[in-house]
Image: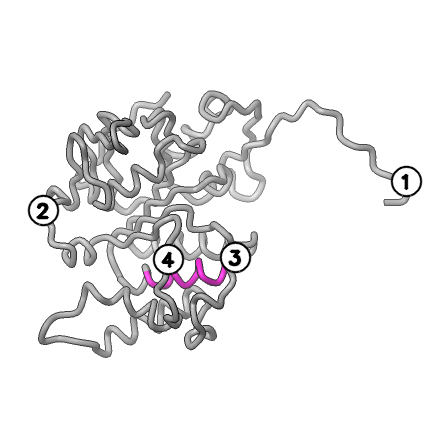
Amino acid sequence: MSSPTRPPNSPLQAAGLGVRYDRRSVIDDLDLAVPPGSFTVIIGPNACGKSTLLRALAGLLPAASGTVLLDGRDIASYPAKDTARRLGLLPQSAVSPEGITVAELVARGRYAHQRLLRQWSVADEAAVTDALRLTDVADLATRRVDELSGGQRQRVWIAMVLAQQTPLILLDEPTTYLDIAHQIEVLNLLHDLNGQGRTVVAVLHDLNHAARYASNIIAMQDGRIVAEGPPATTITAELVAEVFGLANVVISDPLTGTPLVVPADTRRPHPVAAGN
């Protein structure tokens, strides 16, 4: 397994982090430093602690031990609005208020920028308009969120996070409910935002999407980090077999040159009927 060098000036770090649900330890003594300006993707099997880690990094779960540092300071010491101006989070199962419209929900991403003497502004309106456009939901602005399909709702939630205009974005399975075309659109959007200087941290299930889009991979198993680094050195057949229990081969993606995981299914394929 790789032994990562901790990046200097990391915007988001964990030191000796422990997280528990009731008395059960989910994460224990975990160290992590997100490289500044990276597109970091967290991978791992179900129930390995990926979402728990992301929520702890966002300050939504208290640390049972250790600390989470946001811009070099304990995240627990920030007022909520200060955290929200630095870090945007898309949780795994977001729930919208009943009857709220798309435009109203996306506008809530501007809450952290409001002040007692500074309410809605031209900058706020522009941020919401851009977020609606970038996620291709502008034509849904007046629709109620609870009337939308799962894929449309997911894009609306992403728009709300984008309207927040934070330098750091955390997303838990942002391609959930999306068809393949919209999955690629969302990942391309996150890639573009990363190219504009935002640090992106996402949990993804699709290893090939992770390999293609990430600049930094964090592989988890049983609440601990077992590998970390660029996709080319992290996503190997050995790691996939060990972490996911999947026999596989890893080849070079013919379009990007990034690792491409091919499951090794030894079953005989069904014969193709004549004329098909």
Q: Name the residue tied to disc 1.
A: 274
On screen, residue 252 versus residue 15, left or right, reads: right
Give the mark, 3 or 1, whose residue is nearer the N terminus. 3
CA distance separating discs 3 and 4: 21 Å
Give the mark, 3 or 4, whose residue is nearer the N terminus. 4
Question: Looking at this view, is 112 or 168 the one in front?
Answer: 112
Image quadrant of residue 270?
top right
Residue 264's x, y, as percent? Answer: 62, 25
Question: Which residue lies at the image location 10% right of the left edge and 72% below the top edge?
Answer: 116
Say which element carries label 2.
helix
Q: Name the residue tied to disc 4.
A: 95
Say which element carries label 4.
loop
Q: What residue type is labelled 2?
A: Ser
Labelled disc at residue 77: 2
Say which element carries label 3.
helix
Question: Which residue lies at the image location 40% right of the left edge and 32% below the top edge?
Answer: 47
Residue 183's x, y, as percent? Answer: 50, 53
Say which element carries label 1.
loop
Labelled disc at residue 182: 3
Asked whether the beta carbons under mark 2 and mark 1 sit within 8 Å of each other, the answer is: no
Give the mark, 4 or 1, whose residue is nearer the N terminus. 4
Is 123 placed above or below 220 here? below
Give the mark, 3 or 2, whose residue is nearer the N terminus. 2
Labelled disc at residue 105: none
Q: What residue type is labelled 4?
A: Val
Image quadrant of residue 255?
top right
On screen, residue 77 versus residue 20, left or right, reads: left
Residue 210's x, y, as percent? Answer: 45, 40
Q: Which amino acid does label 1 sit on?
A: Ala
Image: magenta residue range: 150-160
On screen, residue 227 versus residue 71, left or right, reads: right
Residue 232's x, y, as percent? Answer: 44, 32
